[in-house]
Image (cartoon, rainbow, N blue to C red):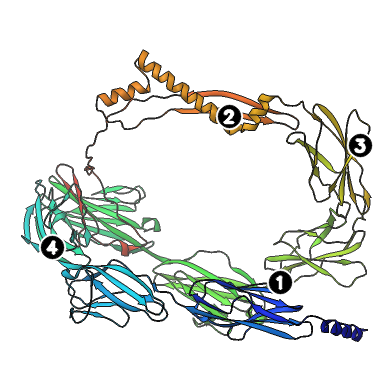
Amino acid sequence: MLKLVHLLGVLVCGSQAALQVSISLNKVELSVGESKFFICTAIGEPVRLEWYNPQGERIVPSKRMALHTETSRSRLIIYNAIIEDAGIYRCQATDATGHTEEASVVLEIYQRLTFRDVQSPQEFRHGETAEVVCDVISSPVPVVVWYYQDKEITEEHHSRFQVLANNNLQIQQVTKADEGVYRCEASVEARGEIDFVDIAMVVNVPPVLSVFQQSFNATADYQESVTFTCMTSGSPDPVVTWHRKGQQLEPSEQYIITRLEGGRSMLTIRNIRQGDGGTYTCKATNKAGSQEREIFLKVFVQPHITQLKNVTAVEGSAAMISCVAEGEPLPDISWRRASDGQTFVDGDKSQDGRFEVRGRHGKSVLTISGVRLTDLGRFDCEALSRIGGHQKSMFLDIEYIPKFLTNHTIYYSWEGNPVNISCDVMSNPPATMLWRRERFTISAEGTANTRVHSADGKSVLEVTPMSDRDFGRYNCTARNNIGVRYQEFILAQADVPSNPYSVRLSAVSQRLATVTFMKPDSHGGVPISYYLVQYKEVGSQDWRDVKSHSIQTTVVLTGLEPNTTYEVRVAAVNGKGQGEFSHTETFQTLPIREPSPPAVHGQRGMGKAYRLGLVKQDDGGMPIVEYIVKYKTDKEEQWMTKLVPGANDFAMLQPLQWNTRYEVEITARNVKGLSEPTFYQFFMPQKPDITESLFSGMGLGTVVGLGLGALLLLLVLVDVSCFFLRHCGLLMCITRTLCSKKTATSGKGKEIEEGKAASMDGRYMRLVQGDERVSNDQQEFEKQHNKKQSNPLNSGNMKLPLKEENGKESLKPDTIEIKVHSDNSIHTKPDDSKA
């Protein structure tokens, strides 16, 4: 029989028309980046149309090449063409007998004249070799000519100028006179194509800096001031900044920076104090470079602290902190703990007896007994006398034995599954950490199934158990020069979970069933990944699998057959594997039946129409085919019928009569039969009058807009009346302001609020006009004062905070100094001196 069919097919194909193929275009020129399509048409009865690229490969659709193929027509689209797309494209048609015919089209692609990311302006430094970049491409290669001041640049007339092989313009020993706009012109003679780009070249001259005087003397605490002056030149104009100890100075009450014409910059230091002594740097910077000059300021002051160093103590031991100060008269020394602000003076002793101060002749010693970790931090030493004061800070660092940070010491795994055992330690100084197994040390390189990963305060032992011998106890040892601590970890062998239980079936319908169950008593030491629910028809050997979402203990079975008995069982799965199945439960899906009566809700439609919403209920196991909607007036006997497809969720009843009550009967039908009918009544209101129709047509937005316009006009009339009759109102306020030439800072306009709401129920629509409220506020215009505000620095007994960042290295011995004068003003300075 199959041979006879094949023979008939051959005979039919033999009677078909001869196969012919043609392409809409024979040869096409295309520039890079353009897109083009070709249409291939086949005459006859082709069964397949295929395109082939210049490499002979069959073209498959991609982002740049799209194919739209019909029975005898195929369109090839090439988007954003590139040079590699050039060549011969073939369209091949094949009929039912396997006979092929083809047509071809030649695609030539060229590169347009294109300037690629040419920058303007291009800046160079005076005296260097400048290379003005003009990156232009085309096919064939373009001819590039450079112009300056409308004249072509040639090496014959410009000895320092040369056009390089890459079309860039090179200028030897560029000067400020070479600055200007250069034109790069490119042309392709074969196509008569020409284009140009103008490039501005800027020549920058490094700054030159000079100072009038290089050293100054001053005395502290006598309100003295000193002014430094720098002269600069260069192109572009250099930016002059003043620096001290590597930090740029900003204008303030103490530092006044003045910039004058001619490149002159002045720094004035007011109210000279001890911390102001030292080297100041005047720095001139522009794009071509920078230059700086130093100016030295020597300040004569007293008193100050000469010795205060950071101290490191061991937890539980004693720490002694010494502060030495000099001055005339000899200053009194006090201590302050930065963590809580508590102060200690000579002879003081804390309530717990751990802090005690002893001092004489300009030296004070703070002794801390039984040092605790809470004592770590900054301590301030302050020296005071009749003529002023001085303050410095130090950092107390505490070293302690390693402390373990976690109590998680039991880990689970199984053969072949790697596990990370983490040992977290806090210590100072940092601890050296080792792992041991049965008295043998695990090297840092690890073994065949162990690896050690270390970081600051953390060591992770990665174990891949290969046999029962790899399970057991592992020891983490942390050691520093203060002491050693141990922590033991247990690697236990994990198992698959036990079986879930109490499997229950609920919400069983014709196609769905919900399976619920209780979690297993044991997860095997490894968290459960998901639950596997298997079900099958009774008598079948093929179980079907359904995975739970995460570890939820409820799974919905879908796609069931009606009136069928199923078996179901549940197993838990963790990283080790799948556990045992639960006891098998049996359930039966419901048989197919007629659908339940549909639920309906109504809503008044537009005009003489009524929208009846249909809410699908239980479909009885088969899709609802249609809804049968019958309706009539309460005065008629004959029903009108409307059939609504089962996929619809509403039925539109129209045209209806005004001022009439309707009765509706709705029935749902599936292949099994009809549901019980649902009855519904609604009332069509009276025909709306002209006014209601007018406002309904205008819409809420239009009505609100008209109301706002009328209200605004009314407010303007009231304000004009107040202006002429009572000499008040917004217009009077504006008039007075203009006449008195005062500047108004702000004015608040009038705000208009109008609320309208449209309310609509299932049978009626009403337009409700809300209250109109008008708020009209008037404010007086205030004078605007333009005064320069200054932020004076607070004097008083201020203590400068010392930045603390994770350890003693961030706080050097003499990090902060504070100078207190006899007028109770406090001054600070960093000081690098050490006794």
In 3D space, how far apart are the residues under numbered discs 4 and 1 (Cα atoms)?
77 Å
Q: Which mark is residue 640?
A: none
For the point 76% across and 36% down, the residue is 603
For residue 436, say whether it is visible. Answer: yes
Q: Is mark 1 on a helix, strand or loop?
A: loop
**Residue tagged by mark 2?**
703
Nearest to N terminus: mark 4 or mark 2: 4
Q: Horizontally, is 157 left or right of 774 in the view?
A: left
Front residue of 342 and 126: 126
Which part of the image, by quadrant, shows the N terminus? Answer: bottom right
**Residue tagged by mark 4?**
233
In 3D space, how far apart are the residues under numbered discs 3 and 1 (Cα atoms)?
51 Å
As drawn, 160 above or below 205: below
For the point 23% across and 69% down, the residue is 150
For residue 833, say whether it is visible. Answer: no
Percent from the top left, x then y, of residue 616?
A: 82, 47
Q: What residue type is labelled 3?
A: Trp
- The quadrant holding residue 552 is bottom right
In 3D space, how far apart are the residues under numbered discs 4 and 2 (Cα atoms)?
71 Å
Q: Horizontally, is 816 left or right of 499 in the view?
A: left
Nearest to N terminus: mark 3 or mark 4: 4
Q: Which amino acid does label 4 sit on?
A: Ser
Percent from the top left, x then y, of residue 395?
A: 30, 59
Which part of the image, by quadrant, shows the C terminus? Answer: bottom left
Front residue of 247 and 396: 247
As drawn, 608 above or below 527: above
**Residue tagged by mark 1?**
70
* Mark nearer the viewer, 1 or 2: 1
Q: 10 Å neighbourhood of mark 2: few (<14), some, or many (≥20)?
A: some
Q: Which amino acid does label 2 sit on?
A: Val
In 3D space, how far apart are the residues under numbered discs 3 and 4 (Cα atoms)?
103 Å
